Image (cartoon, grey):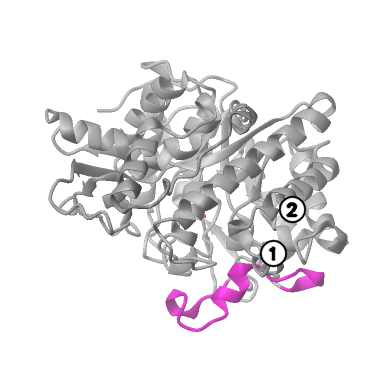
Amino acid sequence: MYFYGTFPEDFTWGVSSSAYQIEGGWDADGKGPSVWDNFTHVPGNIKNNDTGDVACNSYNKLEEDIYLLRALGVKNYRFSLSWPRIFPNGRNNSINSHGVDYYNRLIDGLVANNITPIVTLYHWDLPQALQDVGGWESSEMIELFDSFADFCFQTFGDRVKFWLTFNEPQVIAWASYGTGEIPPNVNNPGAAPYEVAHTLLKAHARVYHTYDDKYRASQGGVISLCLNIDWIEPKTPSNPRDLEAADRYMQFLVGWFAHPVFKNGDYPEVMKWKVGNRSELQSLPSSRLPVFTAEEREYIRGTADVFCFNTYTAKLVTHATTRLNPFSYEYDQEISTDVDSSWPTSALAGHRAVAWGLRRLLNWVKEEYGNPPTYIIENGVGIKTESDVDDHTRILYYKTYIDEALKAYKLDGVDLRGYNAWSFMDFFEWLNGYEPRFGLHEVDFDDPNRPRTPRRSAVYYAEIIRNNETHLDSWAGSRV
Ligand code: BGC
């Protein structure tokens, strides 16, 4: 059922991207290699052996990108800074003025067009030189990330008023260090993700305090981190064990980072209990989940000004009773849930579109964290076809998801401030290369000029922005 209504006048509409996925120029003008550059250069790692070497060539197409953003009428543009483009070896003494200049031109261009930059400091492209000294498994990274962030605040903070430290820390911890699917490909699911997450939380808090202590008074921006949230639905809501399992899943997925930052500086009780209990069953001397000191808890608590997240889909879960093996660290087992695989994914790049899940998710965040000002930073759909003239699937996805966001705002009182579509244009989708197409703009990756063409969804989204609503008279006769 659709809800008819409008978003508030000051609602901030935008589109999002990330550096490695669109920039290209992987070794241009003195940029250093990132872990993703090296990973994609090994044949067999990425579908079709695609790489981000050229990607959308945004490094050389800055004016065109800004022109397209203007045409969409977005209020903000969320992008990320490539750390090795600014500091080729990851350290401040390796500064690359061409990289700094690129981001200055981008930010200036946005500001000149009244588009607010939302800047992510870390969207996964770690300088290889820092991985060589241990990457996020080393606590030295806290200092190094803080130096990078400090430089960025000092250099860009006169114009950038919205900062995000980490994009999807749960993915960094789990997929990079647990399953090891993505760089640096560490497969140590029992311990490494918990240790890495511990370091990421400390690094995030450190950067927040740097902003607070040195820049907030003069620059007046906000700073947060960007979580990945799938809505987790209990398979049988009348079964209390399934309800508990769903909540437990949310705590392992979201609470892992949000509970320390938005609540009390510490991990959710259920995580402490589960991981602690299973560590005990394994006769380990202490829990695999590290412990924060009282001082660290105090330091981490409250280190986000707004609540930001990305969302794509939902999952059905049940409580797992039969397969529990304390020596297996499969994520679902650690949480003691089974994800229902009879709930099929569609052709949508492995994601099932479940728009109503967004409303529940927003309400969960509201209840759990006291209705913080909330921003949806990424939401969209990847479709495995290159061109679909009427772009019906994507339009329907946006219409239904945005309508559920509107219900949460209007009917449920969720303090929703903004919505960003993922993505601005087609891009390099990590392990899946260029196959899933997420763009409001189509990019022709066979053409060296990487021309962009607006899809019909771009026209639709521009009208949503102009009207602050999804039910547009001009679209009434169309299939949406
Ligand atoms: C990431 C993006 C990615 C998107 C679609 C998010 O997890 O932040 O970089 O392209 O999902 O899979």
Q: Is residue 360 left or right of residue 98?
A: left
The residue segment tinted magenta is 27-51
Q: Give the mark nearest the N terminus, 2 or 1.
A: 1
Q: Nearer the viewer, residue 250 or 78?
A: 250
Residue 267 in the image: above or below residue 124: above
Q: Is residue 46 magenta?
A: yes
Residue 319 in the image: above or below residue 137: above
Residue holding disc 1: 130
Residue 159 lies in quadrant: top right
What is the three-letter code of the residue carrying label 1? Leu
Image x and y of residue 262, in percent? 53, 27
Image x and y of residue 370, in percent? 47, 18
Residue holding disc 2: 144
Mark 2 packing: few (<14 Cα in 10 Å), some, or many (20+)?
A: some
Q: Is residue 35 magenta?
A: yes
Q: Point out the image quarter for the N terminus.
A: top left
Image x and y of residue 70, in percent? 66, 43
Residue 288 in the image: above or below residue 375: below
Q: Residue visible at 47% across and 31% down?
A: 259
Whether disc 2's CB lies below 8 Å from ligand 1 is answered no
